[in-house]
Amino acid sequence: MIEKVVILSGSGLSAESGLPTFRDAAGLWRQYSWVELASPEGWRERPELVLAFYNERRAKAWVAQPNAAHLAIASLEKKFDVSVITQNVDALHERAGSTRVLHLHGELAFARGTGPGRLRQRIDGAAIEVGQKCPEGTQLRPDIVWFGEETQHMEESRERVAAADRVLVVGTSLVVQPAASLVDFAGPRARKVLNSLEMDELPAGFEFRPGRATAVVPALVNEWLAD
């Protein structure tokens, strides 16, 4: 029987591909608050500002390349039934070759309408402009979960973590909720590994492997593929 592997990834993984975290990216816009840049309230008040911020993030994400950890995670599919559950909004997991990816916080590569139909369309690295509308006739916005909006795919993510034989947490400090709570659903018999540069409090049952993801994850993946 093929073992199930779940990867829980966060912004530290994309940072190793040169992409700033949200707070680092927002720092370039330090004259504005996160409410203005990433909330429904900010969107209603200054949509042109929100679009400019996310257009810049999208452009940078689209020229970034998957790193060695992304590629190693994708290679696990040669032996395991792999699900990637990510807080990242870039497409680096998919571009590395991962085929089952759940994006908890949305995807920069998509835009959606602002009407009840929430019609979604792929835009890849293209900008969204004020006045650009979906087929339903409403203004397009980034398909991103903003502050105050509901995290996506949580129930399916809990189920996948609970069913996993192996769980790897990489690039996250497990402080952003509700995504951080997913580690609590890992089964007692699952092999559980957490990789980050540092960790204040390790979740119960997890083995800690400190260091850069681009070094630690490929080595771990080689171990798992050789099991």
Image (cartoon, rainbow, N blue to C red):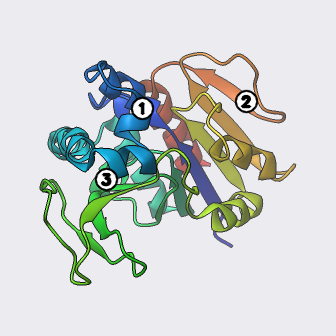
Q: CA distance from mark 2 to mark 1?
A: 34 Å
Where is residue 216? Give x, y as percent: 49, 27
What residue did someone put label 1 on?
34
Kind of residue at badge 3? Ala
Q: Are marks 1 and 3 in contact (CB under 8 Å)?
A: no
Image quarter of the N terminus: bottom right
Q: Quadrant of residue 49?
A: top left
- Which of disc 3 and disc 1 is earlier in sequence? 1
User: Residue at left 61%, top 43%?
Assistant: 168
What residue did someone put label 3 on?
91
Q: Nearer the viewer, residue 71 or 84?
A: 84
Looking at the rendered image, the disc whose residue lies closer to the viewer, 2 or 3, is: 3
User: Residue at left 66%, top 19%?
Assistant: 199
Q: Nearer the viewer, residue 135 or 208?
A: 135
What residue did someone put label 2 on?
207
Q: Quadrant of residue 66?
A: top left
Image vertical order of residue 152 relative to residue 71, above or below: below
Q: Are marks 2 and 3 in contact (CB under 8 Å)?
A: no
- Which of disc 1 and disc 2 is earlier in sequence? 1
